[in-house]
Image (spheres, rainbow, N blue to C red):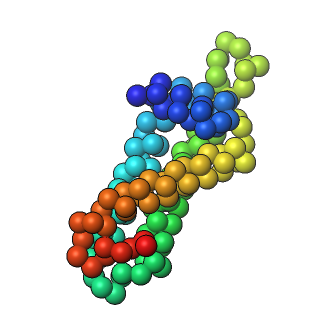
Amino acid sequence: MEESLYSFYDFLNVNRSLLDDLYNATLLTPLTLTMVGLAVGFALIFYFLMDRSRFARLLPWVLMLLGGATLTAIVAYTACNRGAHNMRLRDPANQSLGFFFDQGGGVFFTWALLLFVLCGLLYFLISLFLRKLTTHLRFVPF
């Protein structure tokens, strides 16, 4: 699964050095599953636990979308930042290769922003399916 996720994120033009570090640390699968889990979890909470007529507006739907996507971005940025603080050498025999996760905060933020957008898109697609199964929220987000 790690190889297919590597190919997918490489197709989305993620920084190659960061992608290699995430692949070597086997963080692609956990971060992607976190993104999917948060999108599905927030959608299920909105469409089934908050199935009341007072939530049948666009604002609560957008707030749930932003909540799940923001948590995903925080988890992704924190995982990369923790990897940078470990200061592990890529190859102890050849120190000129540098450390794992030595790209910097801007690249980490770009990665977190990509997962933010992907989580929002996934939440939207799940919403299109789940809205038909609810009583009061059939017309949210539209």
Residue at x-position 42% and y-position 40%: 30
Q: Position of residue 108 (x, y in %)?
A: 65, 46
Image label count: 0
Q: Nearer the viewer, residue 62 or 15?
A: 62
Q: Quadrant of residue 107?
A: top right
Q: Nearer the viewer, residue 4 or 137?
A: 137
Residue at x-position 59% and y-position 33%: 11
Q: Position of residue 62 (x, y in %)?
A: 48, 72
Q: Position of residue 37 (x, y in %)?
A: 36, 51
Residue 94's place in the image compared with 101, above or below, is above
Q: Position of residue 6 (x, y in %)?
A: 53, 29
Q: Which corner quadrant holds the C terminus? A: bottom left
Residue 23's place in the image compared with 56, above or below, is above
Going by the image, does 99 lie left or right of 7? Answer: right
Q: Which corner quadrant holds the N terminus? A: top left
Q: Quadrant of residue 136?
A: bottom left
Going by the image, does 79 lie left or right of 96? Answer: left
**Is residue 89 shown to the viewer in this render?**
yes
Q: Nearer the viewer, residue 98 or 113?
A: 113
